[in-house]
Image (cartoon, rainbow, N blue to C red):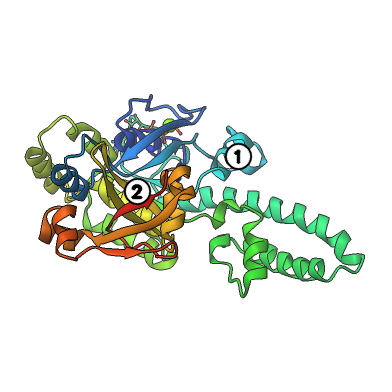
Amino acid sequence: MERVGIVGLPNAGKSSFFNFLTENNVPAESFPFCTIEPNVGILVVPDNRIEILAKNEGSKKIVHPFVEIVDIAGLVKGASKGEGLGNQFLDHISKVDVIAHVVRMFNDERVSHPYQNVDPKRDIEIVETELILKDLETVEKRLEKRFKVARAGDKDARREVELLKELKEFLSQGKRAAKFPRHDEFEKNIVRSLFLLTDKPQILVFNVDELNDEKKRTIEDIIKERDEEYIIINVKLEEELKVLPEEEAKLFREEYNLDGDKKKEFFEKVLKLLDLIRFLTATHNEAKCWTAKRGTTAYEAAGLIHSDIQKGFVKVEVISFEKYLEYGSLKKARESGAVETHGKDYVLREGDVIHFLFRA
Ligand SMILES: Nc1nc2c(ncn2[C@@H]2O[C@H](COP(=O)(O)OP(=O)(O)OP(=O)(O)O)[C@@H](O)[C@H]2O)c(=O)[nH]1
Ligand SMILES: [Mg+2]
Protein backbone atom coordinates (compact mmCIF):
# COMPACT_ATOMS: atom_id res chain seq x y z
CA MET A 1 0.00 0.00 0.00
CA GLU A 2 1.22 3.50 -0.79
CA ARG A 3 2.09 5.69 2.17
CA VAL A 4 1.90 9.45 2.45
CA GLY A 5 3.88 11.10 5.23
CA ILE A 6 2.81 14.46 6.62
CA VAL A 7 5.72 16.74 7.53
CA GLY A 8 6.08 20.40 8.51
CA LEU A 9 6.97 22.71 11.38
CA PRO A 10 5.37 22.21 14.79
CA ASN A 11 1.87 23.72 14.97
CA ALA A 12 1.52 23.92 11.20
CA GLY A 13 -1.65 21.83 11.45
CA LYS A 14 -0.27 18.41 10.51
CA SER A 15 -2.30 16.37 12.98
CA SER A 16 -5.40 18.39 12.16
CA PHE A 17 -4.82 17.62 8.47
CA PHE A 18 -4.28 13.95 9.36
CA ASN A 19 -7.57 13.91 11.26
CA PHE A 20 -9.34 15.53 8.35
CA LEU A 21 -7.99 13.00 5.84
CA THR A 22 -8.43 9.87 7.91
CA GLU A 23 -11.46 10.83 10.03
CA ASN A 24 -9.41 10.09 13.09
CA ASN A 25 -9.26 12.05 16.28
CA VAL A 26 -5.63 12.18 17.32
CA PRO A 27 -4.61 15.04 19.63
CA ALA A 28 -4.06 18.34 17.79
CA GLU A 29 -3.18 20.94 20.40
CA SER A 30 -1.89 24.48 20.32
CA PHE A 31 1.47 23.56 21.86
CA PRO A 32 4.39 22.48 19.68
CA PHE A 33 5.54 18.82 19.49
CA CYS A 34 2.12 17.58 20.41
CA THR A 35 2.78 14.58 18.19
CA ILE A 36 5.70 12.35 19.11
CA GLU A 37 4.99 8.85 17.85
CA PRO A 38 3.68 8.86 14.29
CA ASN A 39 -0.07 8.36 13.90
CA VAL A 40 -1.10 6.05 11.11
CA GLY A 41 -4.48 6.10 9.37
CA ILE A 42 -6.20 5.42 6.08
CA LEU A 43 -7.52 7.97 3.63
CA VAL A 44 -10.45 6.50 1.71
CA VAL A 45 -11.78 8.42 -1.25
CA PRO A 46 -15.12 7.16 -2.54
CA ASP A 47 -15.11 6.44 -6.25
CA ASN A 48 -18.63 6.72 -7.62
CA ARG A 49 -17.80 4.34 -10.49
CA ILE A 50 -17.46 1.48 -8.05
CA GLU A 51 -20.85 2.23 -6.53
CA ILE A 52 -22.50 2.00 -9.93
CA LEU A 53 -20.59 -1.18 -10.75
CA ALA A 54 -21.54 -2.78 -7.42
CA LYS A 55 -25.19 -1.95 -7.91
CA ASN A 56 -25.33 -3.27 -11.46
CA GLU A 57 -23.37 -6.43 -10.75
CA GLY A 58 -25.10 -7.13 -7.42
CA SER A 59 -21.91 -7.03 -5.32
CA LYS A 60 -22.47 -7.36 -1.61
CA LYS A 61 -19.53 -5.26 -0.54
CA ILE A 62 -17.78 -2.14 -1.87
CA VAL A 63 -14.10 -1.34 -1.41
CA HIS A 64 -13.05 2.19 -2.33
CA PRO A 65 -9.47 3.15 -3.14
CA PHE A 66 -7.26 4.23 -0.27
CA VAL A 67 -3.75 5.23 0.78
CA GLU A 68 -2.05 5.11 4.13
CA ILE A 69 -1.39 8.42 5.89
CA VAL A 70 1.36 8.87 8.48
CA ASP A 71 1.31 11.92 10.73
CA ILE A 72 4.90 12.60 11.69
CA ALA A 73 6.25 14.80 14.49
CA GLY A 74 7.03 18.46 13.80
CA LEU A 75 10.49 19.35 12.56
CA VAL A 76 12.63 22.35 13.55
CA LYS A 77 15.98 23.85 12.59
CA GLY A 78 18.75 21.44 13.51
CA ALA A 79 16.55 18.36 13.25
CA SER A 80 19.08 16.63 11.02
CA LYS A 81 21.54 17.03 13.89
CA GLY A 82 19.05 15.76 16.47
CA GLU A 83 17.31 19.02 17.54
CA GLY A 84 13.67 18.77 18.60
CA LEU A 85 12.66 15.21 18.01
CA GLY A 86 15.48 15.00 15.52
CA ASN A 87 16.67 11.96 13.77
CA GLN A 88 14.05 9.46 14.81
CA PHE A 89 11.34 11.13 12.82
CA LEU A 90 13.60 11.60 9.81
CA ASP A 91 13.60 7.82 9.90
CA HIS A 92 9.83 7.82 9.70
CA ILE A 93 9.98 10.07 6.66
CA SER A 94 12.33 7.68 4.91
CA LYS A 95 9.60 5.01 5.00
CA VAL A 96 6.93 6.89 3.03
CA ASP A 97 6.34 7.12 -0.73
CA VAL A 98 5.08 10.70 -0.89
CA ILE A 99 5.62 13.68 1.38
CA ALA A 100 2.75 16.04 2.16
CA HIS A 101 4.41 19.17 3.49
CA VAL A 102 1.97 21.23 5.57
CA VAL A 103 2.75 24.94 5.47
CA ARG A 104 1.17 27.27 7.98
CA MET A 105 -0.62 30.26 6.49
CA PHE A 106 -3.17 30.89 9.20
CA ASN A 107 -2.90 33.60 11.83
CA ASP A 108 -3.98 32.63 15.29
CA GLU A 109 -2.54 34.20 18.43
CA ARG A 110 -3.54 31.17 20.46
CA VAL A 111 -1.35 28.88 18.39
CA SER A 112 2.33 29.64 18.87
CA HIS A 113 4.64 29.68 15.86
CA PRO A 114 8.14 28.25 16.37
CA TYR A 115 9.60 31.24 14.47
CA GLN A 116 7.09 33.80 15.75
CA ASN A 117 5.35 34.92 12.55
CA VAL A 118 3.63 33.43 9.53
CA ASP A 119 6.11 33.30 6.65
CA PRO A 120 5.46 30.33 4.37
CA LYS A 121 8.51 30.74 2.15
CA ARG A 122 10.89 30.79 5.11
CA ASP A 123 9.11 27.90 6.79
CA ILE A 124 9.27 25.70 3.70
CA GLU A 125 12.97 26.41 3.44
CA ILE A 126 13.60 25.53 7.09
CA VAL A 127 11.94 22.14 6.73
CA GLU A 128 13.54 21.49 3.39
CA THR A 129 17.00 22.45 4.60
CA GLU A 130 16.80 19.81 7.31
CA LEU A 131 15.76 17.15 4.83
CA ILE A 132 18.53 18.18 2.45
CA LEU A 133 21.12 18.12 5.26
CA LYS A 134 20.07 14.61 6.14
CA ASP A 135 20.39 13.62 2.47
CA LEU A 136 23.84 15.19 2.30
CA GLU A 137 24.86 13.03 5.21
CA THR A 138 23.60 9.95 3.36
CA VAL A 139 25.45 10.91 0.18
CA GLU A 140 28.67 11.63 2.07
CA LYS A 141 28.56 8.27 3.82
CA ARG A 142 28.13 6.46 0.51
CA LEU A 143 30.82 8.58 -1.08
CA GLU A 144 33.30 7.63 1.58
CA LYS A 145 32.58 3.92 1.08
CA ARG A 146 32.72 3.99 -2.69
CA PHE A 147 35.78 6.20 -2.76
CA LYS A 148 37.88 3.38 -1.36
CA VAL A 149 36.58 0.92 -3.95
CA ALA A 150 37.15 3.45 -6.72
CA ARG A 151 40.72 4.02 -5.63
CA ALA A 152 41.30 0.30 -5.90
CA GLY A 153 40.50 0.70 -9.59
CA ASP A 154 36.85 -0.40 -9.85
CA LYS A 155 35.36 1.29 -12.94
CA ASP A 156 31.72 1.41 -11.83
CA ALA A 157 32.74 2.72 -8.44
CA ARG A 158 34.67 5.51 -10.16
CA ARG A 159 31.64 6.50 -12.14
CA GLU A 160 29.53 6.35 -9.02
CA VAL A 161 31.94 8.57 -7.12
CA GLU A 162 31.80 11.19 -9.88
CA LEU A 163 28.00 11.13 -9.77
CA LEU A 164 27.88 11.29 -5.97
CA LYS A 165 30.18 14.32 -6.02
CA GLU A 166 27.85 16.10 -8.43
CA LEU A 167 24.87 15.17 -6.30
CA LYS A 168 26.61 16.43 -3.18
CA GLU A 169 27.33 19.74 -4.88
CA PHE A 170 23.71 19.95 -6.06
CA LEU A 171 22.29 19.34 -2.59
CA SER A 172 24.78 21.78 -1.05
CA GLN A 173 23.18 24.50 -3.15
CA GLY A 174 19.94 23.84 -1.26
CA LYS A 175 18.24 22.00 -4.11
CA ARG A 176 16.01 18.95 -3.66
CA ALA A 177 17.40 15.65 -4.92
CA ALA A 178 14.19 15.17 -6.93
CA LYS A 179 15.40 17.90 -9.30
CA PHE A 180 18.82 16.30 -9.82
CA PRO A 181 19.15 15.30 -13.49
CA ARG A 182 19.83 11.63 -14.23
CA HIS A 183 21.05 10.66 -17.67
CA ASP A 184 20.77 6.88 -17.82
CA GLU A 185 19.73 3.75 -15.92
CA PHE A 186 23.06 3.59 -14.13
CA GLU A 187 22.62 7.08 -12.70
CA LYS A 188 18.95 6.50 -11.90
CA ASN A 189 19.76 3.32 -9.99
CA ILE A 190 22.55 4.91 -7.98
CA VAL A 191 20.36 7.80 -6.87
CA ARG A 192 17.40 5.52 -6.19
CA SER A 193 19.52 3.24 -4.03
CA LEU A 194 20.25 6.13 -1.64
CA PHE A 195 16.56 6.49 -0.63
CA LEU A 196 16.95 10.23 -0.24
CA LEU A 197 14.24 12.13 1.60
CA THR A 198 14.14 14.95 -0.93
CA ASP A 199 13.98 12.54 -3.86
CA LYS A 200 10.45 11.59 -2.83
CA PRO A 201 7.59 13.25 -4.64
CA GLN A 202 6.16 16.10 -2.60
CA ILE A 203 2.89 17.94 -2.37
CA LEU A 204 2.68 21.26 -0.54
CA VAL A 205 -0.38 21.74 1.64
CA PHE A 206 -1.02 25.44 2.27
CA ASN A 207 -3.05 25.64 5.46
CA VAL A 208 -4.80 29.01 5.21
CA ASP A 209 -7.53 30.75 7.13
CA GLU A 210 -9.15 33.05 4.59
CA LEU A 211 -7.82 32.92 1.05
CA ASN A 212 -7.41 36.64 0.29
CA ASP A 213 -5.56 38.13 -2.70
CA GLU A 214 -2.34 38.62 -0.81
CA LYS A 215 -2.21 34.96 0.25
CA LYS A 216 -3.08 33.87 -3.25
CA ARG A 217 -0.17 35.87 -4.62
CA THR A 218 2.23 34.48 -2.02
CA ILE A 219 1.24 30.94 -2.96
CA GLU A 220 1.51 31.64 -6.67
CA ASP A 221 5.00 33.06 -6.20
CA ILE A 222 6.14 30.03 -4.23
CA ILE A 223 4.71 27.61 -6.78
CA LYS A 224 6.14 29.49 -9.74
CA GLU A 225 9.57 29.26 -8.23
CA ARG A 226 9.32 25.61 -7.19
CA ASP A 227 7.11 24.02 -9.81
CA GLU A 228 5.45 21.55 -7.45
CA GLU A 229 2.05 20.05 -6.76
CA TYR A 230 0.03 21.77 -4.04
CA ILE A 231 -3.38 22.17 -2.48
CA ILE A 232 -4.85 25.07 -0.56
CA ILE A 233 -7.03 24.16 2.39
CA ASN A 234 -8.37 25.60 5.62
CA VAL A 235 -7.84 22.54 7.76
CA LYS A 236 -9.62 23.88 10.81
CA LEU A 237 -12.65 24.91 8.79
CA GLU A 238 -12.82 21.51 7.09
CA GLU A 239 -12.69 19.82 10.48
CA GLU A 240 -15.58 21.95 11.67
CA LEU A 241 -17.62 21.41 8.52
CA LYS A 242 -17.48 17.63 8.87
CA VAL A 243 -20.63 17.62 10.98
CA LEU A 244 -22.65 19.73 8.52
CA PRO A 245 -24.66 18.51 5.55
CA GLU A 246 -22.76 18.97 2.27
CA GLU A 247 -24.90 21.87 0.94
CA GLU A 248 -24.35 23.92 4.08
CA ALA A 249 -20.65 23.10 4.17
CA LYS A 250 -20.37 24.35 0.60
CA LEU A 251 -21.76 27.78 1.59
CA PHE A 252 -19.18 28.14 4.34
CA ARG A 253 -16.36 27.19 2.02
CA GLU A 254 -17.46 29.79 -0.49
CA GLU A 255 -17.40 32.42 2.21
CA TYR A 256 -13.73 31.61 2.78
CA ASN A 257 -13.07 31.52 -0.94
CA LEU A 258 -12.27 27.82 -0.78
CA ASP A 259 -14.44 25.40 -2.64
CA GLY A 260 -14.15 21.81 -3.78
CA ASP A 261 -13.68 18.42 -2.23
CA LYS A 262 -10.23 18.69 -0.66
CA LYS A 263 -9.87 15.01 0.15
CA LYS A 264 -10.51 14.09 -3.43
CA GLU A 265 -8.23 16.83 -4.75
CA PHE A 266 -5.44 15.68 -2.44
CA PHE A 267 -5.91 12.03 -3.35
CA GLU A 268 -5.91 12.76 -7.10
CA LYS A 269 -2.64 14.63 -6.74
CA VAL A 270 -1.06 11.82 -4.75
CA LEU A 271 -2.07 9.36 -7.48
CA LYS A 272 -0.58 11.65 -10.10
CA LEU A 273 2.70 12.02 -8.21
CA LEU A 274 3.01 8.27 -7.81
CA ASP A 275 1.91 7.66 -11.37
CA LEU A 276 -0.93 5.39 -10.28
CA ILE A 277 -4.06 4.43 -12.18
CA ARG A 278 -7.31 2.93 -10.90
CA PHE A 279 -9.00 -0.20 -12.19
CA LEU A 280 -12.23 -1.83 -11.15
CA THR A 281 -13.32 -5.39 -10.43
CA ALA A 282 -16.73 -6.72 -9.43
CA THR A 283 -17.92 -10.12 -8.28
CA HIS A 284 -21.06 -11.08 -6.35
CA ASN A 285 -19.05 -10.80 -3.25
CA GLU A 286 -17.23 -7.53 -3.72
CA ALA A 287 -16.76 -4.57 -6.04
CA LYS A 288 -13.39 -2.95 -5.63
CA CYS A 289 -11.43 -0.03 -6.99
CA TRP A 290 -7.70 -0.83 -7.09
CA THR A 291 -4.68 1.37 -7.57
CA ALA A 292 -1.67 0.22 -9.59
CA LYS A 293 1.43 1.74 -11.16
CA ARG A 294 0.89 2.97 -14.68
CA GLY A 295 2.22 0.26 -16.98
CA THR A 296 0.99 -2.62 -14.80
CA THR A 297 0.13 -5.69 -16.89
CA ALA A 298 -2.87 -7.96 -16.48
CA TYR A 299 -0.59 -10.64 -15.04
CA GLU A 300 0.90 -8.26 -12.47
CA ALA A 301 -2.57 -6.97 -11.56
CA ALA A 302 -3.70 -10.56 -10.98
CA GLY A 303 -0.90 -10.85 -8.42
CA LEU A 304 -2.15 -7.76 -6.61
CA ILE A 305 -5.51 -9.39 -6.15
CA HIS A 306 -4.55 -12.93 -5.20
CA SER A 307 -1.55 -15.18 -5.77
CA ASP A 308 -3.92 -17.98 -6.89
CA ILE A 309 -5.38 -15.78 -9.62
CA GLN A 310 -1.88 -15.03 -10.85
CA LYS A 311 -0.76 -18.65 -10.64
CA GLY A 312 -3.74 -19.94 -12.62
CA PHE A 313 -3.96 -16.91 -14.94
CA VAL A 314 -5.77 -17.69 -18.21
CA LYS A 315 -6.91 -14.33 -19.60
CA VAL A 316 -8.72 -11.11 -18.74
CA GLU A 317 -11.94 -9.59 -19.96
CA VAL A 318 -11.69 -5.82 -20.24
CA ILE A 319 -14.08 -2.98 -20.86
CA SER A 320 -13.63 0.71 -20.10
CA PHE A 321 -15.97 2.06 -17.46
CA GLU A 322 -17.49 4.56 -19.94
CA LYS A 323 -18.33 1.76 -22.33
CA TYR A 324 -19.61 -0.41 -19.50
CA LEU A 325 -22.11 2.34 -18.66
CA GLU A 326 -23.58 2.11 -22.16
CA TYR A 327 -24.50 -1.53 -21.56
CA GLY A 328 -25.30 -1.41 -17.85
CA SER A 329 -23.91 -4.84 -17.00
CA LEU A 330 -20.97 -7.06 -17.83
CA LYS A 331 -23.36 -9.72 -19.05
CA LYS A 332 -25.00 -7.41 -21.61
CA ALA A 333 -21.66 -5.98 -22.69
CA ARG A 334 -20.32 -9.48 -23.20
CA GLU A 335 -23.37 -10.53 -25.21
CA SER A 336 -22.96 -7.50 -27.46
CA GLY A 337 -19.31 -8.31 -28.04
CA ALA A 338 -18.16 -5.10 -26.33
CA VAL A 339 -15.86 -6.88 -23.90
CA GLU A 340 -12.31 -7.46 -25.11
CA THR A 341 -10.22 -10.42 -24.02
CA HIS A 342 -6.49 -10.12 -23.50
CA GLY A 343 -3.55 -12.16 -22.28
CA LYS A 344 -0.90 -11.65 -19.63
CA ASP A 345 0.80 -8.71 -21.31
CA TYR A 346 -2.21 -6.43 -21.54
CA VAL A 347 -1.36 -3.04 -20.01
CA LEU A 348 -4.09 -1.69 -17.77
CA ARG A 349 -5.66 1.70 -18.43
CA GLU A 350 -7.30 4.13 -16.00
CA GLY A 351 -10.91 3.13 -15.42
CA ASP A 352 -10.72 -0.38 -16.88
CA VAL A 353 -13.34 -2.80 -15.60
CA ILE A 354 -11.53 -6.13 -15.45
CA HIS A 355 -12.63 -9.70 -15.00
CA PHE A 356 -9.86 -12.24 -14.40
CA LEU A 357 -10.26 -15.77 -15.68
CA PHE A 358 -8.03 -18.32 -13.99
CA ARG A 359 -7.74 -22.01 -13.32
CA ALA A 360 -8.14 -22.82 -9.64
N1 LIG B 1 -6.83 28.99 13.30
C1 LIG B 1 -6.42 27.83 12.83
N2 LIG B 1 -5.90 26.96 13.67
C2 LIG B 1 -5.47 25.78 13.18
C3 LIG B 1 -5.56 25.45 11.80
N3 LIG B 1 -5.04 24.22 11.63
C4 LIG B 1 -4.65 23.79 12.84
N4 LIG B 1 -4.92 24.74 13.78
C5 LIG B 1 -4.66 24.69 15.23
O1 LIG B 1 -3.26 24.71 15.43
C6 LIG B 1 -2.91 23.90 16.56
C7 LIG B 1 -1.85 22.92 16.13
O2 LIG B 1 -2.41 22.02 15.21
P1 LIG B 1 -1.86 20.53 15.05
O3 LIG B 1 -2.67 19.91 13.99
O4 LIG B 1 -1.73 19.86 16.36
O5 LIG B 1 -0.40 20.88 14.51
P2 LIG B 1 0.81 19.89 14.27
O6 LIG B 1 1.48 20.41 13.05
O7 LIG B 1 0.36 18.49 14.26
O8 LIG B 1 1.75 20.18 15.53
P3 LIG B 1 2.86 19.22 16.23
O9 LIG B 1 2.33 17.83 16.30
O10 LIG B 1 3.00 19.84 17.55
O11 LIG B 1 4.07 19.34 15.38
C8 LIG B 1 -4.20 23.27 17.06
O12 LIG B 1 -4.67 24.04 18.15
C9 LIG B 1 -5.12 23.40 15.84
O13 LIG B 1 -6.47 23.47 16.26
C10 LIG B 1 -6.13 26.40 10.92
O14 LIG B 1 -6.28 26.18 9.71
N5 LIG B 1 -6.54 27.58 11.49
MG1 LIG C 1 0.88 16.87 15.41
Residue 263 lies, with reference to residue 228, above or below; the image says above
State the count of labels.
2
Question: Which residue is at a point 29% across and 48% down the rendered structure image?
Answer: 281
Within-10-Å neighbours for mark 2: few <14, some 14–19, many 20+: some
Question: Which residue is at a point 48% across and 44% down the rendered structure image?
Answer: 307
- Which residue type carries mark 1? Asp
Question: Which residue is at a point 20% across and 39% down the rendered structure image?
Answer: 59
Q: Is residue 14 visible?
A: yes
Residue 107 is situated, as x and y percent measured from the top left of the image, at 31, 40
Q: From the Cβ of disc 1, is ligand 1 less than 8 Å away?
A: no
Within-10-Å neighbours for mark 1: few <14, some 14–19, many 20+: few
- Which residue type carries mark 2? Trp
Residue 182 falls in image quadrant:
bottom right
The residue tagged 2 is 290
In the rendered structure, find residue 197 and report the number of the disc placed on it: none
User: If the picture is divided into quarters, which one holds ligand 2?
Assistant: top left
Instruction: Mark 2 and mark 1 in contact? Answer it, CB < 8 Å.
Output: no
Residue 333 falls in image quadrant:
bottom left
In the rendered structure, find residue 91 and report the number of the disc placed on it: 1
Q: Camera-side residue: 228 or 220?
A: 228
First in residue order: circle 2 vs circle 1: 1
